[in-house]
Amino acid sequence: MSLMQPLLALLALVVSVESWAQCGVNQSCPVCKPDACLINDKARQEYEKKNNCKFAQGDLCGGVAIDAGKQCCGKDPRTGNAKVVDKVMTTKDVIAKAADSFTWTNYLRTCPDKKQNNAAPNALWQQCEVGKYETPEDAYKIVEVQQNGTARPYCIDGCSEPPSAVAAAYSAGIFLTADHNNPTGYAEESSFYQACVKHDVCYQTCNDNDQTACDTELTNNSIAACNTIPVDHVTIVFGVNPLPHFVNTREKCKKAANDMFFVLNMLGMGKPAFNTRRQQYCQYC
């Protein structure tokens, strides 16, 4: 026997022991990797076979067993470590410590396998019915319901600026009417309603878009509606100045669209609604 054969045998033994030590009898296999989470027995068995190792009993998510019907294996947004989370997103799942607040960025870190929510009504989402409020905090009732396959339907309430904000904008001459969907009152084509429908859907869609993306789309669609107004059209305004005066309707419309973005996004008035809707309409797995 040559010296090479014993050396090769020893090397194979070392490699084998090293491989086993990574996931041996006294150590659990890693449960979550950046590209995969083991959330059921089948995935667990496949991982064990592929990596020649065994999980400790019940070790499905960072050493913690999960209820596959109600929970998923997510990630801690701060550390990236495996973390048991509820299928339906809740604020507690994405807050890493007491000083943190809920953010969509943290949710994306926590939930790499998010999808549109198709769960039954629960504490976060009660109903989507025309003529009713989606939540007690809403200012306007649902006026339209859009089906979305087997997922929760989209609840549409149009442009949902608070009535007090609409009244203030009208008094200041920013809105030419007190209609929250159509601030100029020129025609149906210049109404912001369809832009706001898309905005509602954007807030209620589980994807990587953040609030700014949704609010920017609202502004662009609203300005497109404004551009249906003739460039030279004027509206007479009463009550803002001592004497009635004329203003350019299209330009007033565009100013209203930009002011809506400022209030929703820059002042943060849309943040609570965005966070609530994403919690209602997005789930982990």
Image (cartoon, rainbow, N blue to C red):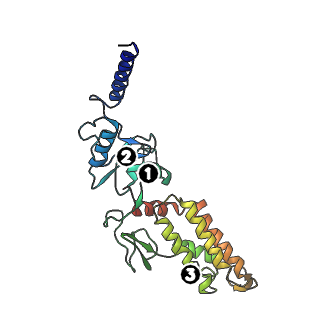
Q: Which residue does the image show at 58% across and 70% down from the upper left?
A: 218
- The answer to which of 240 and 127 lies nearer the viewer is 127
Secondary structure at badge 3 equals: loop
The disc, 3 or 2, on the residue closer to the chain's N-terminal end is 2
Q: Which residue is mark 1?
A: 112
x and y percentages locating residue 77 in the rendered image: 45, 45
Q: Which residue is mark 2?
A: 37
Mark 1 neighbour density, 10 Å: few (under 14) some (14–19) many (20 or more): some
Counting labels gives: 3
Q: Looking at the rendering, in which quadrant would you find the C terminus?
A: bottom left
Question: Three-letter amino acid code at disc 3?
Answer: Asp
In contact (CB < 8 Å): disc 1 and disc 2: yes
Q: Is residue 79 above or below residue 249?
A: above
The disc, 3 or 1, on the residue closer to the chain's N-terminal end is 1
Q: Which residue does the image show at 69% across and 77% down from the upper left?
A: 252
Mark 2 neighbour density, 10 Å: few (under 14) some (14–19) many (20 or more): many
Q: Which residue is mark 3?
A: 179
Q: Which residue does the image show at 32% across and 62% down from the upper left?
A: 123
